[in-house]
Image (cartoon, rainbow, N blue to C red):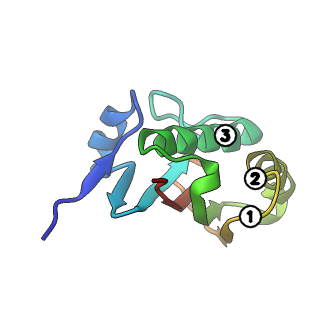
């Protein structure tokens, strides 16, 4: 069996090691990115919701970049929301800035009751260019 090819963004390996998971796994020309939240460098949640969503996207961007990818390479998105109805407008505004024009990636949004102190999480599958 092939060994997993883990990808980590610069400066956050300790956070992933402490929680025993990889930021992303490269398999062939696909990148499977673990759920990214709006965590600060120390792993604590960003308290302001919009800032937390923006930070989650920034953490996602750093993980994609570590694998040689960008937002244009994303083909599938799953996002998790603790209060989808209240959060929807904020998330859509940030989403529009990250994906400003078609073709948009597939997107599944899931309402959840718990995200370990966070209110938004995003995980993606991307195709690695080249």
Asked whether the residues under the numbered discs 3 and 2 touch, taking CB atoms below 8 Å apart as contact, a structural biologist would say: no
Crowding near the residue tagged with mark 1, few <14, some 14–19, many ≥20 C-alpha atoms within 10 Å: some
Q: Which residue is mark 1?
A: 104
Q: Is residue 22 above or below residue 43?
A: below
Relative side of 49 to 125, left or right:
right
Give the residue drawn at x 33%, y 64%: 28
* Image quadrant in which you'd find residue 26: bottom left
Give the residue drawn at x 78%, y 46%: 94
* Residue 99, numbered label: 2
Give the residue drawn at x 55%, y 45%: 60
| Circle 1 SS class | loop
* Residue 84: x %, y % from top left: 76, 64
* Residue 52, numbered label: 3
> Which sits earlier in the primary sequence, circle 2 or circle 1?
2
Structural distance between the alpha carbons of marks 1 and 3: 22 Å
Asked whether the residues under the numbered discs 1 and 3 touch, taking CB atoms below 8 Å apart as contact, a structural biologist would say: no
* Residue 37: x %, y % from top left: 55, 46
Crowding near the residue tagged with mark 2, few <14, some 14–19, many ≥20 C-alpha atoms within 10 Å: some
Q: Is residue 124 above or below residue 46?
A: below
Give the residue drawn at x 50%, y 45%: 64
């Amino acid at each position: 069996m092939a060994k997993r090819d883990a990808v980590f963004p610069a400066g956050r390996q300790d956070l992933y090691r402490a929680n025993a998971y990889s930021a992303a796994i490269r398999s062939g020309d696909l990148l499977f990115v673990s759920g990214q939240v709006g965590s600060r460098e120390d792993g604590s949640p960003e308290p302001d919701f919009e800032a937390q969503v923006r930070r989650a996207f920034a953490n996602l961007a750093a993980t994609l970049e570590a694998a040689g990818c960008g937002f244009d390479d994303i083909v599938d998105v799953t996002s998790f929301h603790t209060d989808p109805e209240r959060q929807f407008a904020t998330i859509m505004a940030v989403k529009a800035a990250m994906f400003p024009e078609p073709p948009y990636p597939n997107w599944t949004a899931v309402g959840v009751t718990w995200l370990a102190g966070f209110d938004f999480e995003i995980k993606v599958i991307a195709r690695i260019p080249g």
